[in-house]
Amino acid sequence: MDRNRNNILLIYVLILIFGITPATIASQQEHNKFPCEIDSQFQGNNEILSEIKHKTARKFIKDYLQENSLEKLYTSLNCVSDAIILAPEKPKFWVTLGKVHSEMAASKVSMAKTNAIMAYQQALELDPDDTATMILLGVKLTETSEYIEALLHFETALTKTPYLTTYDTIQWMNIAYLAGKQTKRGTLFYEQMVNDNPELFYLYIFKAVLHQTHFDFAQAREDYMKIILNAEAGRDIKSIALKLLKELKKQGAS
């Protein structure tokens, strides 16, 4: 990576540390309260030191999740920022920076969602095939009502890497399909996913929800029955399908 590219990335990380607009004195002071102090024999070796800083940042995220201490979160921010300054070309560092800002967003820190999006976008610029990061970015874009772009990342990620098709991910996708008025697109995507990956029975649940949204109750009922009548579907998913089918009938859609 050439020097100009590195300089651009360094400017980018400084923006993400302090926010999109010029940092206020208060935000700088808050950030500087919790420096990433590493007593390491590898001082001067940027490659190794950046990995140590990154590992420390991930540790502080775990500590934050256990203790709910913003001090831990700001320390994690400092550590991963230091790591990026030392080695801005490593996508995983930017992913961790995105996760830190995502946690800050949950604590209502100003601009955190936007900063998380920027960090994930930078990670994908460095590693365009990272489907796990596509999903992380899709979630943040959904939270900021950028539904069409979110769906592009979700659909690309799950098409390339079907094993990332988790219940939580599909819930976020359904929010984007519904809020973005893309229900038909969603039903077609889920149908193709199930055709290619027949073990993903729960996609029929979410497909049925989309059909119900535009009052296609017959198709919703058909989706539930595909689960209920399939011998290979698990007991839990069948139980959900039966419950939702009963709710559908209560709506007068029998």
Image (tube, rainbow, N blue to C red):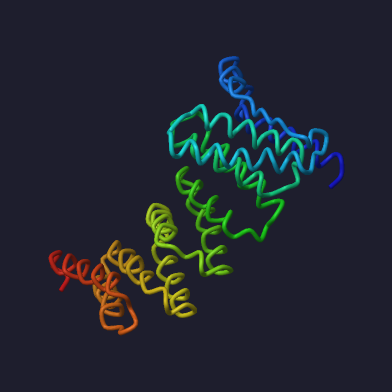
Coordinates of residue 32 in the picture (x, y in percent): 62, 21
Residue depicted at x 31% and y 83%: 230
Seen from the viewer's position, the closer of residues 96 and 215 is 96
Q: From the viewer's perspective, is 242 left or right of 211?
A: left
> Which of the pair 26/221 is nearer the observer?
26
**Residue at the farthest top position:** 25
- Left or right placement of residue 120 versus residue 11 in this view: left
Up the image or down, 70 lies above or below 201; here it is: above
Q: Is residue 176 shown left or right of residue 223?
A: right
Q: Where 52 falls versus 184 (above or below)?
A: above
For image coordinates 30% across by 80% down, the residue present is 226
Foreground of the two, 237 or 224:
237
Q: Residue sitting at 53 percent across and 32 percent down?
A: 73
Q: Is residue 73 above or below residue 95?
A: above
The quarter in which the C terminus is drawn is: bottom left
* Residue appearing at x 37%, y 56% in the figure: 178
Q: Quadrant of residue 39?
A: top right
Q: Please give the count of numbered marks on the rendered protein.
A: 0
Say if 200 sits above or below 54 in the image: below
Where on the picture, by quarter, is residue 17? Answer: top right
Furthest residue in direction right, as rendered: 2
The percent position of residue 59, horizontal first and vertical second, equals 56, 40
Query: Can you give x and y, in whole percent of width and height, for residue 16 in the image?
Result: 63, 33
Question: At which x and y percent is residue 250?
Answer: 12, 65
